[in-house]
Image (tube, rainbow, N blue to C red):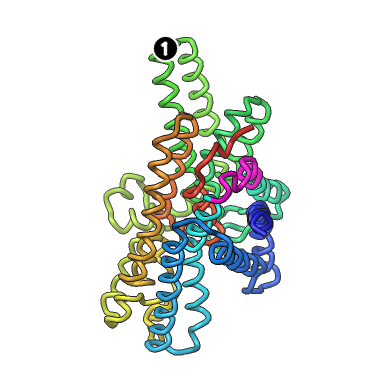
Amino acid sequence: MKEKIIKLVELFLLLSPLFDMLTAFCLKVLNIDFTIGMIVRFIIMLICLFYIIFIYKKKDKKYLLLILGSIFIYLLIFLTVMIIDKDTSILLYEGKNALRTFYFPVLLITFYAITKDNKTFINNKTIITVYIIYLLGIFIPDILGIGFDSYEITKTGSIGFFNAANEISAIISILMPFFLLYLYEKKSFILTVLLIGILVFDILSIGTKGPLLAFFLILGVIVLIYILYLVKEKLYKRLSLLLGIFVLFIFFLSVYLPKTAFYKNIEIHLDFLGVESISAVFTDYELFDHFVFSSRLKFLSNTYDSYSKAPLQEKIFGIGYIENYNSDNETTKMIEMDYFDILFRHGIIGFILYISIFIYFLVKSIKHTISLKNIPYKICMSLSLFLIILLAFMTGHVLLAPSVSIFVALLLTKKEGSLCEN
């Protein structure tokens, strides 16, 4: 039974890109809000809960069950407050979104238990296989001109056969260090050029900032470390070659970038804002918020205003996902900055519960990463953890989107070996 459940969860992770494609098909083609991906993810969560309740036998089981119990008691109180302060008609909407949010800590705890029982949980090649499927799921439809648009209005970009640009961008970003490490360990020039080309194409065609930020951050760290190594070893010929490659890369970007969705979106954004000089973006707060944070700081201010006016029970347990219910200012717009969405949607109690679980496993993962002797893997893991923390703050959809948070839960509980072994 134990091994069958583990294999089932592994199979689910391997098929995650296909479930995401089915979700996009249901939403964009069939106009069905209740999707196959949602159903399957809920079933997997139930299977993981079954595992930890009936199969897991380690000494810390009672503590894990206590934490899970606290989550579900909180969710029950949260929904009760929503029904009392709003009405029963919002139960499905509030409940669905609350479950989406707390999907991550539930999976984090259950993955931790599964990993303690089976340290080889999730085959090292599975993550890379999943990543390549995501890349091809964007690349092939975009090349054929049949991919879904990244944005419904104004901006341009394509996300292949997927639904949400921000969620796919987050997956591409946080797993990117492992993908690049895999290519480094493979030592295949043709494979590296081919897959890096597809990666860069996808990053620029999606049109969002997150993956490009992640790519340049990772590339900058790798190049800096390699330069320091070459200088230390006095390998000046290699250093000259590296600088030459870097110049060619910059030249390629300068020629190709203006033709991409990412660049066109910047132009559209600047034209919409009436900005004639890029320096104006960094001297005007509203322009900076609109251009860099896509108005997230404005949404943060609006939600804070709603939270500050909410009754005491909502300050403690959350205002929920429908702000200013049954008023002229009613909205379901999220801030899209995960930490703040958790705080305001779930109040002080929900925030403390959620973030405590996240920080506990994050610290454990950081300590494990520091102890690693495999330097490339240590750098890879450090970059991924940093991107998780950064993107959860800047772009959101990292902790609160089940399609993304399942990989965050995996990375925070992965302890043995490299995800990128040949």
Can residue 161 be seen in this snapshot? no
Which residue is nearer to you in this view: 151 or 297? 297
Q: Amino acid at mark 1?
A: Glu
Question: Mark 1, residues whose alpha carbon is within 10 Å: few (<14), some, or many (≥20)?
Answer: few
* Image coords of residue 355 (percent x, y): 36, 60
Considering only vertical position in the picture, is 393 above or below 128?
below
* Image coords of residue 208 (percent x, y): 50, 51
Which residue is nearer to you in this view: 241 or 294? 241
In reply to whether residue 57 is colored magenta, the answer given is no
| Left or right of 108 in this view: 313 | left
Quadrant assignment for the N terminus: bottom right
Which residue is nearer to you in this view: 256 or 88? 88
Considering only vertical position in the picture, is 399 above or below 417?
below
Helix, strand or loop for disc 1: loop
In reply to whether residue 127 is colored magenta, the answer given is yes
Question: Which quadrant of the figure has residue 40?
Answer: bottom right
Question: Which quadrant of the figure has residue 322?
Answer: bottom left
Can residue 350 be seen in this snapshot? yes
* Image coords of residue 320 (percent x, y): 40, 76
* The residue positioned farthest toward the right in the image shown: 144
Give the number of marks. Answer: 1
Q: Which residue is mark 1?
A: 233
Q: Which residues are magenta?
A: 117-130
Residue shown at 43% from the left, 55% from the top? 395
Residue shown at 61% from the left, 47% from the top? 122
Quadrant assignment for the C terminus: top right
* Image coords of residue 258 (percent x, y): 53, 41
Residue shown at 48% from the left, 10% from the top? 237
